Amino acid sequence: MKLTRLGAALVAGALLTGAAAAYAANNYTIVTVVKVTGISWFNRMDEGVKEFAKDNAGVTAYQTGPGRADAAQQLQIIEDLIAKKVSAIAVVPYDPPTLEPALKKAMDRGIKVVTHEADNEKNTMVDIEAFDNNAYGAGLNERLAACMHDEGKWAVLVGSLGSRSQVQWADGGINNAKAKYPKMDLVEPKLETNNDGERAYEVAKEVLRKHPDLKGFQGSSSLDIIGIGRAVEEAGLQGKICVYGTGLPTEAGKYLESGAVNGIAFWDPKLAGEAMNKIALMLLQGKTVKNGDDLGLPGYNKVTVEKGPGKGIIVRGQGWVNVDKSNYKNYPF
């Protein structure tokens, strides 16, 4: 069948328009903003962001964050991204309340917002959590209690009192001990370490000086465990003090080997980075996450969904892992 010149032009125009629309529909920029750059935890998350970008043609995805853990610096980065009119922001808030106005502004301007480790964030569309935070903290505490034979003085460290998830882990542990182990004596609740390994070391040393009969530590930040382990090892107290907390195998490994740290728990930041970006892309495509959905990532194969504190939802996986000296080498990150 022959087309008239006008008909051919119309068909060509329609094809071009369709191609342009298809390109526009996939030409997204998703930016992940972490608490602080340059530490192993978020370096690992960056691997997940890069893998997501590689697997999704037409999507520009990258990670950024402040050079030190600082709420004001993180806020400024988000303000800059709003000005650049990115498609979506996936953020791990250092201090969730600080970001509320900026994240509201982002959503008001059509930018999709996904958060992680911030189930108290009101201005988010989806907050993705690797697990139930209180249960995670209680799980760490059960291991600590067993090591301490259910009694003795213990202390809790957190990277930041503004970090929602870390406080929940600490409270999960504290409440677990209070309910089940009356002979465990919490002498230092929620000492802040500013997500800094050197600061955690100084705090742990001071706790050991103040309480020479201390029997246990529970850490929250991945850097707490490093500082505690260093202080315990330096004091020659391996085997005399029980230490459990969030950590990464490659960082905590030498302390697990020496006995200065008894065990750690974690979720894979790489998978969390992929999950945040995957959900952001779903939102951009007009989709949402439903109860029981499989995100196609280990630990996120059957998520649960609940209403968040604002208009958004909280999505929880089952992604936490317990390791000790016997099996930490199975996780090369």
Image (cartoon, helix red, strand yellow):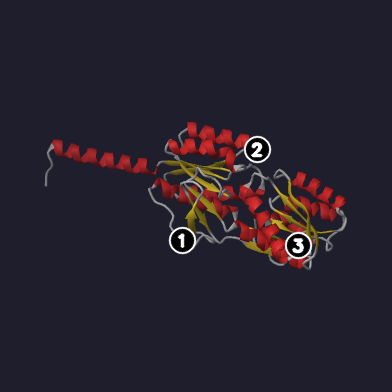
Q: Is residue 54 above or below residue 146?
A: above
* C-alpha separation, residue under disc 3 versus residue under disc 1: 33 Å
Residue 39 at x, y = what percent?
Answer: 67, 46
Whether residue 30 appears in this view of the structure is: yes
* C-alpha separation, residue under disc 1 versus residue under disc 2: 34 Å
Whether residue 328 appears in this view of the structure is: no
- Pointer 1 local density, CA inside 10 Å: few below 14, some 14–19, many at least 20: some
Determine which residue is flagged by label 1.
294
- Pointer 2 local density, CA inside 10 Å: few below 14, some 14–19, many at least 20: some
Q: Which mark is residue 262?
A: 3
Residue 251 at x, y = what percent?
Answer: 71, 53
Residue 93 at x, y = what percent?
Answer: 59, 43
Q: Which mark is residue 70?
A: 2
Amino acid at the residue labelled 2:
Asp
- Pointer 3 local density, CA inside 10 Å: few below 14, some 14–19, many at least 20: many
- Of the two numbered discs 3 and 1 on the same chain, state the one appearing first in sequence: 3
